[in-house]
Image (tube, helix red, strand yellow):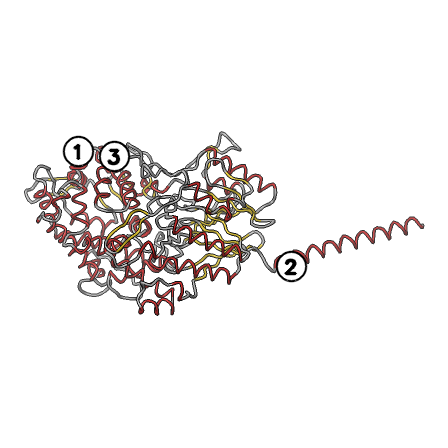
Amino acid sequence: MKKKRISFVLCAVLVCFLLATTVACDKKRNEGDEHPLQVAVLSDIHLMTPDEIKDPTGKNFVYYTNKLQTMLPLSEALYKSTVDQLIEQKPDVVLMTGDLSQTGSKKSLQVIADGCKRLKEAGIKVFVTPGINDLSEYGTTFDGDKKTEKEECVTLEEFVEMFADYGYNQAISRDEETLTYFADLDETHRLLVLDSISLFDYELNSRDVSGVSKSPVLSNGTLQYVDEGLAESVDLRKEVLVMSYLPLSNEVGDVYGQMTKRFVVAIDQTEERSIIEMLMYHGVQYAVTGHLHAKNHTVYDDKVYFDLHDYTASCTTCYPLETIYLTADEDQYIVEHKALSSVKAEYLPSYLSAEDRLAFLADPVAFSKQYLIDHIDVSANAIMHKEGHPYGFITYLLVSLDYIDLENIATDAKAIALGRCFGEAYEDLMQMTLYGEENSIESVCLEYGIFLPDIGKNMTVKEYFADVFCRMFTNEIVVNEENDETTVLKYIGYTAIRNMTAIDISEQLQELRPDVGIKYFDLSSLADGLFHDDQLCLKVNAKDPDGNTYSIIASVLSVLEPVLIKADIKVLGTRLSVLGVDQTTIDSLLGVLDNYLEVVLALFDDYSTEDNTLYGLKIRSYLDFSAGTIKIGDILGIGMVDIFAKDLLF
């Protein structure tokens, strides 16, 4: 009986001990929950120091920034102010997803490193990965209307050394081939920094000698390293957060890399998976990325594995000046976007006017929005009226297509006249209102029996473009989804083609190149197909004024004949480069032409092609080979606007 009492007492003591331990653990866990892990994300800072700019009104700098929506003249002030706000907010970790510098200059990257040091001294962990600009060696200083000698840039090794204390020295392991690494954020959270840039071939400008795109893809060795590191993290019950400069999906085409390139994973040599599938297989649910300059949230839904959320951060130095904050909450992150609230006057460059200083200090976000609107207008004018000349984009396109010589561009009256026609058509389109009985997009749609969706406000096309772009950057409007706003954009595009019918392109091109047999190009029939069927019919026949019948596809190919004869699409890139067009835009255009011409030629020669993608859009899903049509309405409505916004404005 005594033994039983003793046993009972021991059991009671043991139970009490276990209960006490459980309570203590729960208390500790609850105390930990009072300060869950918080991660802040900066992306695409594109810093350029005032010393590299000197005078933002200089001719060369103005032309350079026509192709960019980032606030380069204020980028250093914006970055320093963002660091101030981060120190005030006190997140546990700050991630920088790449394109820290605009030109890869050592001077600008040193400013970034100095900010990282301030964050570290404030007790905040910092992890970085390079973007395509950081290792580009394009460093340039502007001086009034001139460009001086190139700024000193950093090599891959120098970048790692400069940012050694902000990720590379903290890594628990590093890939042997790239700058990919794993690092612990705290006891339960691990970071995978997925390097997608260090393999990029700058010497070949992303294209090999045959003109084929050379993308910064992940090698099998790197993929095996990632796979094994993720498997280890699962074993240790670590929640993995992924950081990558490029979005996980191939949204911007082969020019910027195939992050969705399929590969054989190490765990199963017989099964192919994409990087997205690999991450999902190992239970990764969150990734933060950059490059696109507009915030975006993509969810990869899988019925077998966990859903994967890819949060693309907006540009730190562009409207709306936001930073992403991810706060750990059990097995998920709560995501917030916080805008920059203030800027210190001491950070502002001396070349900023008194009026702009007051406006910028009063409301940085409102100032950045107006800057973006002004940029859209300036960029459009630069495209249509090159640096104030009477000729514009069309004239330069004629140079690229070998219709006129570069040396004669300023004196060729016929080319200038054609360019002016397109410029005037563009201006007329911009001044049209969305709604109204006359000279409106609505009135044009009614001619075809179509009712334009009512978006609740009337404005000019120019104002609407500015409104859409600003709301795209804040994700208030999703341009890759079908909605009233994208439908209006689609019909604006159709109206532009319809308005062009007044320009006899065929005759004017024939005058420029009498040796080329330009076939009749009937824009009115294209407009009819677009408005009535949302399709661009490439096999439809049209009669020229002399009664000759030609298909649209034959007309297109006849226009492209000067370039196609040479069978060398690189000629186009070389000519554009001579004209001062930036390499990113050239690669984007060539990537489109590579895909588009293959599809066009396939239709013309009546043979099938492989399943091509055009900037992430599956071409085959928009093609009807039997009818010879492209569902251009679908592309314009839910894809093309996104493409031009993201690739032609960087």
Secondary structure, mark 1, is helix
The residue carrying pointer 3 sits among few (fewer than 14), some (14 to 19) or many (20 or more) residues within 10 Å by Cα, namely: some
Kind of residue at badge 1: Ile
Q: Give x and y (percent) for residue 86.
A: 49, 59
The residue carrying pointer 2 sits among few (fewer than 14), some (14 to 19) or many (20 or more) residues within 10 Å by Cα, namely: few
The residue carrying pointer 1 sits among few (fewer than 14), some (14 to 19) or many (20 or more) residues within 10 Å by Cα, namely: few
Tell me which numbered mark, 2 or 3, is placed earlier along the sequence.
Answer: 2
Q: Residue at x 21, y 35 (%)?
A: 604
**Alpha carbons under labels 2 and 1: distance apart:** 73 Å
Q: Give x and y (percent) for residue 647.
A: 32, 49
Q: Is residue 25 left or right of residue 133?
A: right
Q: Give x and y (percent) for residue 582.
A: 28, 46
Looking at the image, residue 121 lies above or below residue 608 = below
Name the residue tied to disc 1: 565
Q: Is residue 12 left or right of residue 540?
A: right
Q: Give x and y (percent) for residue 383.
A: 22, 52
The image quadrant that residue 318 belongs to is bottom left
**Alpha carbons under labels 1 and 3: distance apart:** 17 Å
Name the residue tied to disc 2: 31
Name the residue tied to disc 3: 602
State the residue lying farthest toward the right.
1
Tell me which numbered mark, 1 or 3, is placed earlier along the sequence.
Answer: 1
Q: How many marks?
A: 3
Kind of residue at badge 2: Glu
**Alpha carbons under labels 2 and 3: distance apart:** 65 Å
Q: Nearer the viewer, residue 650 or 328?
A: 650
> Mark 1 or 3, which is nearer the eye?
1
Q: Which mark is residue 66?
A: none
